[in-house]
Image (tube, rainbow, N blue to C red):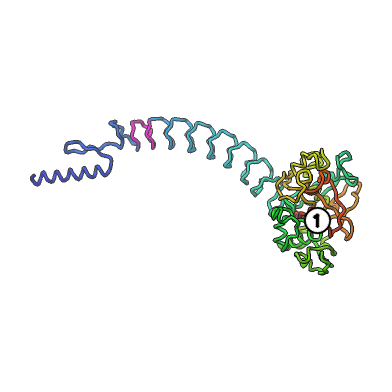
Amino acid sequence: MNRRRWNLFFLLTVALVACAAASGCSCSSGSEATLQVNDDDASLDDDASPDDDASPDDDHDDDASPDDDDNDDDASPDDDDDNDDDASPDDDDDNDDDTAPDDDDDNDDDASPDDDDDDNDDDASPDDDDDNDDTAPADDDVSPGFVTIPHGTFTMGSPTDEPGRGGDENQHQVTLTRDFEMSIYATLQSQFTTLMGWNPSSYKADCGGDCPVELVSWWDAVAYANQLSLADGLPPCYVLTQVVCQTGTNVGDDYMQCESAIYNGIMNGAWTLNGVDTVYECTGYRLPTEAEREYATRADTTTAFYDGPITEVDCSPVDPNLNTIGWYCGNDNEHVRPVGEKLPNAWSLYDMSGDVWEWVWDGYATYDAGPDTDPVVDPAVGAAHVLRGGCWDCAASGCRSAYRSHDPALGYRAGYVGFRVVKTAPAP
């Protein structure tokens, strides 16, 4: 082979290698290379598109359909401004594929009117302020585990024809002028243990940290409220002096010395309010007044229970409404139960009927006959005191919203007596 033919053979070989490396060439049997497109057909469809058909659809697919304005391979007319492959007209500004009219500015697929722009839920409640819950109170700045109860006017007491009614429940109008925050649950064993350093409860093993603390006196409850205020940097509501532990030990104003398994809590003492005239003016945590407790339980209802009337006053047969919202002798006569297992009321408060009796601030007294505003009966040492809500061992009648238990003195303790705390809400 002479040098000229050798050079021609060498150049042809180089061209063939480059063509094969590009995966876009085929070669004739002659000495010329013919460039073609990247498909496996014989059509000469080499237009301006990167696909391999003869259609003028200029997209990244391999069909001849006229749909080519998106990244799919169908001929549907849905291709407007989303990444789906349907023909539905829902494609406005979200990432779903339905025709629901809810598509405003959130990522859900319902038609509910709650979709404003400041929460992550799908309800129509007016709570949508700046949190991620579904409660109706304006709870923007509420302490964790609390809800705001709005001030208002209600009828306290029970109608004369309510089954199981007590003679001290005469109806009268009460106005509460201040919003207040109330704990969603009764104070838990775990919360009491963390703050006070011990757990006085009878049912530690049966129930555990998620159950209400019980076997606490009224004094233990107000001591807890004071300690919670201090923990949150708030002034305590109460000043406790002349404190006597359950063991009989006098500790003066060092009430926390009683809060241990050695001294078994507080049995007696003296109290004054800390720089305010009424408990409603306290800025720290406190016990609810009797009026606040019934008002919060009812949550704008007027029936015996917040979910309806009472039909069975004893343990058996089971009252269907109470069975839905609370533990009592008809569905539990063994021990206290974990909080939150029954349905809450409209203000997201749980176990307001049943499970444990709850201490309130007030001593026991007959109601005033006429309307009353921000009522309170300051407790007296040695006098009867009020418990509210009923308990796991109570008859249905004792769990009604209006029922008043008023036998125990302030040092009383039992395995079905607990408490929950409140705090007057800051003025707007």
Q: Is residue 331 above or below residue 212?
A: above
Using the image as rendered, state which of residue 80 and residue 291 is in the foreground: 291
Quarter of image, res 191: bottom right
Q: Is residue 314 above or below residue 263?
A: above
Q: Is residue 40 above or below residue 405?
A: above
The answer to whether residue 153 is visible is: no
Q: Position of residue 315 (x, y in %)?
A: 81, 43
Using the image as rendered, state which of residue 335 and residue 358 is in the foreground: 335
Q: What residue appears at the point 28 percent right and 40 percent down from the top-left corner?
A: 24
Chain part drawn in magenta: 51-63
Q: What residue appears at the point 21 percent right and 38 percent down from the top-left corner?
A: 33
Q: Position of residue 256 (x, y in %)?
A: 76, 66
Quarter of image, res 275: bottom right
Split into 4 quadrants, where in the image is the N terminus?
Answer: top left
Relative to 99, 324 lies left or right: right
Q: How many marks?
A: 1
Disc 1: CA contacts within 10 A as few (<14), some (14-19) or many (>=20) = some
Q: Position of residue 421 (x, y in %)?
A: 76, 55
Secondary structure, mark 1, is: loop
Q: Is residue 55 magenta?
A: yes
Using the image as rendered, state which of residue 416 and residue 4 is in the foreground: 416
The type of residue carrying mark 1 is Ala
Could you tell me what secondary structure mostly forms the magenta stretch? loop
Q: Position of residue 416 (x, y in %)?
A: 79, 53
Q: What residue is shown with label 1?
A: 414
The answer to whether residue 16 is visible is: yes
Q: Is residue 280 magenta?
A: no
